[in-house]
Image: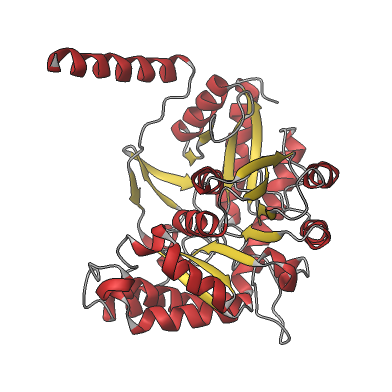
Amino acid sequence: MAFNHINNYHNFIESELAKLVKDNLYRRLKLISLGEGKRRCTTGSVDGKDNIINLCSNDYLGLSYNRDILKKTTMYLKQISPCSSRLIAGNRPKMIELEEKLAEHRETEFSLIYPTGYMANLGVITTLADKHTTILSDELNHASIIDGCRLSGAKIIVYRHNDMEHLKQLIQTVFSKKRKIIVTEGVFSMDGDIPKLKQISNIAKEHNALTVVDDAHGDFVFGYSSSTSSPFAGIPSYLGVKDEIDVHTSSLSKGLGCFGGYVASTRQTRELLINKSRQFIYTSALPEHLCISALAALSKVIKGNLQQKLFDNVEFVFSKLSQCGFKLNNNSKSQIIPIIIGQEKKALEFSNQLLDNGIFVQAVRFPTVKKGSARLRISLTALNSKNQLRSAIDTFKMVGKRLEVI
């Protein structure tokens, strides 16, 4: 009996893997090694191929390689991990200091750090929503938002991407006294565009709904260098609606180049998360030396020079790819530039041929995006040189013609 039970699961696993291969959806881990010298942050080795230009990184400002940040991190490295949740024995001074700085950064009352941005989204949504709640979620929201909605037990209503008329129609169907949450990303991670936050906040006010924005890809990148507001505080600040967003979630591992995630909101929200968020309560705390990394990086992002370099690169690459005739998302104004291929098999082949010619860009396929909308997801950094980008554009053009994409 036990043998048959194991054999049944073996057959199931083999069948699932075979289906993924057949549908061109099978994934495997590529082995990445850092390069050497000044360009170690933008070139490296991929599956044994050397001097590969990396256009896959979410380290948008290149801070994960910053020598000052690395030095401060290693100087403070006294313990690998607190080996405890914060509610037991893992709450440390640098965690509190980082939370205070992050609250200042987002101009909220308080913040709370999580081990990852994924866990921050799960923690917020599962704490603030339950079976008596209706969540209205953009159809292109990240998997962490989708999973949080499902785990919460709330009724989930999905509105068409950035379609405010559809959102209005759907929210009007919800019983007026029912708790409502509208959740969206700040920069959509696979499309690179941004939400209509002003309209979303107006709809939320009219219908007494809470607004939650996951700003993982906009935080520390978008915003303004200003004496009157926190510099580069993300999409809500960039769009002038920071005071109208109820709950902000974000990542420390993208624009900030560090590790972890956080929630920024009111004191009461923080207290509720500490007491009810399973993703906060039942996991080890973020190591204190990683809090030091984030604190050191915060002083770097406020200057604005890295953001300027990044958006110079964005404008250059978007313009050149458009001139080549690639199908791009014209609404994307961010460092995420998707080249829409469509067929999963062709997207994989395109990615493989790019790698053979020195360019690393992953093919993104279902379930990350809809079937038939496979793409090459370019994510640029401030440290990509123009020579690297020119070389990459030439390679894109060559492979695009060979595969009859352009």
Q: Which quarter shows the C terminus? A: top right
Question: Residue 35 at x, y = what percent?
Answer: 36, 53
Regarding residue 302, the answer to whether it shows in the image is no
Question: Residue 29 at x, y = what percent?
Answer: 35, 36
Image position of 289 with respect to 337: above or below: below
Residue beneath the point at 49% across and 63% down: 62
Instruction: Write down the quadrant of residue 259 in the picture.
Output: bottom left
Q: Which quarter shows the N terminus? A: top left
Q: Nearer the viewer, residue 188 or 198?
A: 198
Q: Nearer the viewer, residue 67 or 37?
A: 67
Count every numbered label the image shows and give the total: 0
Instruction: Write down the quadrant of residue 278 in the picture.
Output: bottom left
Q: Nearer the viewer, residue 239 or 271?
A: 271
Residue at the farthest bottom position: 227
Question: Residue 191 at x, y = what percent?
Answer: 66, 43
Residue beneath the point at 53% across and 45% down: 153
Instruction: Write down the quadrant of residue 74 in the picture.
Output: bottom left
Q: Nearer the viewer, residue 186 or 119?
A: 119
Q: What colour scheme does the image use?
A: secondary structure
- Left or right of residue 396: residue 169: right
- Left or right of residue 174: residue 71: left
Regarding residue 325, the answer to whether it shows in the image is yes
Image position of 205 with respect to 196: above or below: below
Residue beneath the point at 48% across and 46% down: 53
- Left or right of residue 5: residue 316: right
Image position of 59 with respect to 373: above or below: below
